[in-house]
Image (tube, coloured by chain):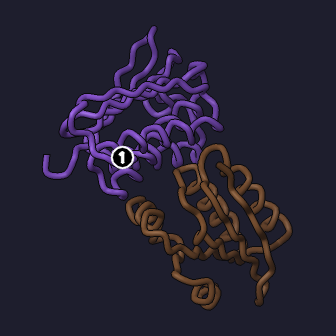
Chain colours: A brown, B purple
Amino acid sequence: MDIKVNVREAPGDCYVVDLSGEIDVYTSPKVKDAIGDLIDRGVYHLIINLEKVRYIDSTGLGVLIGGLKRVREHGGSVNLVCTNPQIKKIFDITGLVKIFGIFDSEDSAMKALV
Amino acid sequence: MNQAVQHAIPELVELRIPSRAEWVALARLAAATVANRLSFSIEEIEDVKLAVAEACTAVIQHEGHGEFIQLTCEALSDCLRIRVHDSGRHGTAVSSGRHMDFDEARIAGLGVFLIRTLMDEVSYDVHPQLGTDLLMVKRLAGR
């Protein structure tokens, strides 16, 4: 079990964080570090691509919430790309669909950035 | 192998893992494997996986947890019954009421909320000397 994290620059002062694998109590620190490093560098508009994430738990949700909280302090935003129904369900039942922008494609997530 | 349990009910699977983050994946996969022996849908199996992972995570994130987590999965004719036992003497982070900062409490709260939402029955059994049991039941649809 592992998580792969790839960070790439996108148009418009935005970065995309591609995640692949499983995000749980063991792997979420790696995701937290990647997002935290970007914010420390002054990147406040993020797209986090969860298309290749097979599993996420509350610690993974916590990392995403923490990232969102930090970028919002700087007027930034975090949009998620998510097509996995099981993962969408977790955002749905926790009510996080109301605080994250969740999109079916990277293009639509990019267009919706603040 | 994906045959529903028919002739060997009840079946009991026990697993003891170190109370460390890197072992939670094994616990959730074990629970999913037992759930798969019953006639749960893929979505329900994912519910079980997440609930077990959240229970183990709650133990690990609690100060004073035991050295091991004992997972017991019991496949019955109408449900899957799961027990997550922590031999630590102070209950889980959630049941002990220990001080947590706001963000930590919020995430722990999310975990408990998920467990309660995804499973049909959830209860705690706290023994001052023996540790804490989290008991969860997932019923088969229509049973």
Seen at 25% across and 30% down, the residue is: B8
Q: Give the structural element (helix, strand or loop) at label 1.
A: helix
Return the residue at label 1.
Answer: B36
How far across and down, in percent of the image, does residue B58 sit?
51, 36
Quadrant, the C terminus of chain B: top left
User: Can you see residue A46?
Assistant: yes
How far across and down, in percent of the image, does residue B120 sit?
26, 44
Seen at 74% across and 63% down, the residue is: A5
Which residue is farthest top? B129
Seen at 56% across and 27% down, the residue is: B17
The answer to which quarter of the image holds residue A113 is: bottom right
Is B51 situated left or right of B16 in this image? left
Circle 1: is it few (<14), some (14-19), or many (20+) Cα within 10 Å?
many
Q: Tag 1: residue type?
A: Asn
Foreground residue, B3 or A84?
Answer: B3
How far across and down, in percent of the image, does residue A61 sit?
56, 57
What chain does mark 1 sit on? B
Residue B133, compared with residue A62, is above or below; it is above
Residue A37, compared with residue B106, is above or below; it is below
How far across and down, in percent of the image, does residue B33 sit?
42, 42
Seen at 63% across and 37% down, the residue is: B21
Q: How many marks?
A: 1
